[in-house]
Image (cartoon, helix red, strand yellow):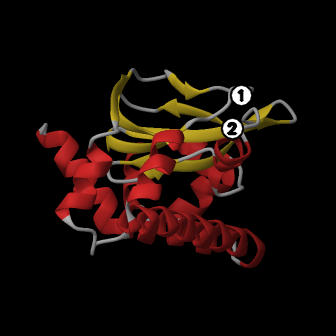
């Protein structure tokens, strides 16, 4: 087995379901598809139907959408993260989200149809799938609560605390849009003026 694949599976599984056995991990590895993505290349474009969970092995992927002529960052994924366009993936409808590599990246695609077949054969794979969904729901709720209840400074500090890789690696304009602030407001927050 390829070393990067093994590291990625370990990181992804351990973040969601660390009790998964080596046998369960091997089942997942057997259906993953390696893909190299150039900086600026899109993994999914608006209007396409998503058919994969994406495990990020190397690099950083940004999910975003367009609103009133501006792009708005929805999510960042980097090494050990799982990326998905959840509505498109589950409803089989065209995606509103775009997923683009911010850096040269290597990802592993987990086809949803093959995952469902594995879920029929393995309780462990079922539990892993359930944990992915639980994690996604909790993240969505935390993000919504942050936008509703936290100040700009609190949102920035939360991102710095929970995802320092984003602060180190993503362009400031994308970070600002993710935090629902202008680049000028982000600059003031970073300088301590807010």
Label 2's element?
A: loop
Q: Is residue 183 above or below residue 123?
A: above
Horizontal side, residue 186 vs residue 29: left or right: right
Horizontal side, residue 89 vs residue 135: left or right: right
Q: Residue at x 74, y 79 (%)?
A: 149
Q: Residue furthest bottom?
A: 149
**Residue 37 falls in image quadrant:** top left
Q: Position of residue 92 (x, y in %)?
A: 71, 38
Q: Residue furthest front?
A: 121
Question: Could you give the CA–CA distance between mark 1 and mark 2, rounded to whole angstroms?
Answer: 6 Å
Quick one: label 1 or label 2, which is nearer the N terminus?
1
- Can the viewer see residue 70? yes
Q: Which mark is residue 177?
A: none
Crowding around mark 1 (Cα neighbors within 10 Å: few <14, some 14 to 19, many 20+) is some
The residue singled out by tag 2 in the image is 97
Q: Nearer the viewer, residue 86 or 172?
A: 86
Q: Position of residue 116 (x, y in %)?
A: 51, 50
Horizontal side, residue 32 vs residue 68: left or right: left
Q: Position of residue 179 (x, y in %)?
A: 64, 57
Q: Residue at x 62, y 44 (%)?
A: 85
Q: Is residue 43 above or below residue 147?
A: above
The residue singled out by tag 1 in the image is 46
Q: Residue at x 45, y 64 (%)?
A: 126
Q: Are marks 1 and 2 in contact (CB under 8 Å)?
A: yes
Label 1's element?
A: loop
- Can the viewer see residue 170? no
Location of the N terminus (image quadrant):
top left
Q: Nearer the viewer, residue 39 or 94?
A: 94
Q: Nearer the viewer, residue 122 or 15?
A: 122
Q: Is residue 65 above or below residue 79?
A: above
């Amino acid at each position: 087995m390829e070393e990067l694949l093994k590291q990625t599976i370990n990181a992804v599984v351990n973040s969601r379901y660390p009790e998964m056995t080596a046998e369960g991990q091997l089942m997942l590895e057997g259906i993953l598809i390696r893909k190299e993505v150039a900086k600026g290349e899109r993994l999914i474009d608006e209007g396409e139907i998503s058919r994969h969970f994406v495990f990020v092995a190397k690099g950083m992927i940004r999910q975003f959408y367009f609103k009133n002529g501006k792009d708005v960052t929805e999510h960042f994924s980097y090494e050990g993260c799982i990326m998905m366009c959840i509505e498109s993936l589950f409803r089989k409808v065209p995606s509103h989200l775009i997923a683009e590599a911010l850096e040269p990246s290597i990802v592993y695609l987990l086809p949803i149809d093959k995952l469902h077949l594995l879920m029929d054969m393995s309780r462990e794979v079922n539990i892993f799938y359930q944990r992915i969904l639980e994690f996604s729901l909790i993240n969505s709720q935390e993000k919504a609560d942050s936008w509703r209840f936290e100040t700009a400074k609190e949102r920035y500090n939360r991102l710095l605390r929970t995802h320092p890789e984003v602060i180190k690696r993503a362009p400031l304009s994308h970070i600002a849009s993710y935090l629902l602030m202008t680049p000028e407001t982000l600059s003031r927050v970073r300088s301590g003026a807010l």
